[in-house]
Amino acid sequence: MSPQLKQIPSNEKIPAEADVVVIGGGIIGAAATYFLSKQGYKVALVEKGQVGCEQSSRNWGWCRQQNRDERELPTSGLSMRLWDEMSKDIGFDLGFRRCGLRYATDDPKQLAQWDSWRDLAKQYGVNTVMLNAKEANAMLPARGRTWIGGVHSIDDGKGEPAIAAPMIAEGARALGATIHQNCAARGLDITNGKVEGVITEHGTIRTNRVLCAAGAWASAFCRHHGISFPQASVRQTAFRTKPIKSIGDAVYTNGVALTRRLDGTYTVAISGTARLEFTPQGIRYAKQFMPMFMQRIKAVQFGVSSSFLKGPEALNSWSNDSMSPFEKMRILDPAPVKSNLRKTLATVKALFPALEAMEIEESWGSFVDCTPDAIPVISEIDSVEGFFLAAGSSAHGFGLGPGLAHIAADLVMGRQSQIDTQPYRLSRLLDGSKVKVGAI
């Protein structure tokens, strides 16, 4: 059920010490390791499974500024520049292409939202144009649906989820970082409120700076140390097709989304729908998430599965010298929802005559980690000196990953960030501040 993923080797042994330890080898953890290494710091990246094996290889691959919440727009602009720079500097093809994104809709309300967003886009220099009905139907000819308009985000693009995080990690290794896969971080060694090391299943790495970029597992890791991080995960389903003719590199409709991959296949998913499963962690933070649930309830499916008893949102407890939940589940690899697969494939075939021969090559499920306001957390942890958090990307982590990682790297090393970090502080989710739910 796991999607394609570029495999990279691990360094033979964990180091005795490091300037920074990064926990989690997704796009943010890998990119933060790269940026820190580029500044000359000795960095160890520890990952319980394989670099990029969870959400970073299971997403659409979109790298966009279009329709971002205003709190994310500065970071999205930075991310697009960094995608360009990393693709050149690392020396590996990350699959990043500024191919433009095409949106089409027959929903007047959705079109009005896109149109009203243009005023915001102009303030941030986003190169986007509205499409009238004729232009939208010419750009994305469909059967049985007549588009009333759309958007063409000209400078946005896509990356390749199967290779991006592993290749960025390799870029970091070329700069001196060490990469440790199948090496779970069980906990922090804390003395007098200060980090002194990371305790892994293979031994302790001495350090006084730790960045937790553990995706859906971040809240569980924080809770192990008495730190509250409101986080929920929604289950999504996607599939990769067999090679097929192209109707565009990145296509969004109010029904399905398609992303062309380098090998001539497509990643396909239902757009705007996800499955929320009841879990102990979900119950714990239900109050904080209520505004989001009420706003998006029509787009949410509900259910119960094994995630109630095992995985990042179950009732987990462990000691630093015993096996942790991270070792018990190396890869968070939920099964795809078969009914969603059937529905999505049927929708694509009915909508686009050019894709009637589409066949599924592989399919997968994933858990997307979200915050109550759908805005990431990039923050120092006040109660533990030297501990930093970069998680809760809320389905935006791949495209925003380089920018979020750059902000996190600056924060860890005490440097002034190019971006205002106030919207990303953890305290906003804990101090009673009013929740303003961000854009999807």
Image (spheres, rainbow, N blue to C red):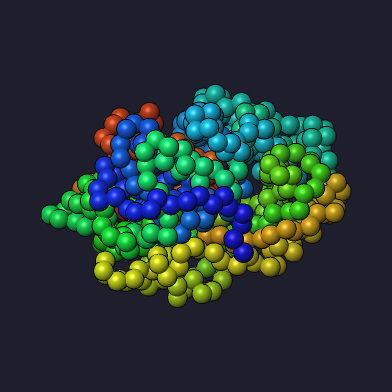
Residue 273, given in percent of the width and then of the height, sits at 62, 57
Q: Vertically, is 159 above or below 185?
A: above
Residue 138, given in percent of the width and then of the height, sits at 83, 34
The answer to whether residue 220 shows anywhere in this view is yes
Closer to us: 99 or 427: 99
Report the residue at 51% width, 42% height from top. Answer: 167
The answer to whether residue 253 shows anywhere in this view is no
Q: In this view, does 45 lie to the left or right of 99?
A: left
Residue 357, given in percent of the width and then of the height, sits at 85, 54
Quadrant into which the N terminus falls: bottom right
Looking at this view, name the residue that lies furthest to the front.
Answer: 12
Q: Vertically, is 117 above or below 348?
A: above
Report the residue at 85% width, 46% height from top. Answer: 354
Q: In which quarter of the image is residue 48?
A: bottom left
Residue 266, given in percent of the width and then of the height, sits at 71, 48
Report the residue at 25% width, 51% height from top. Answer: 16
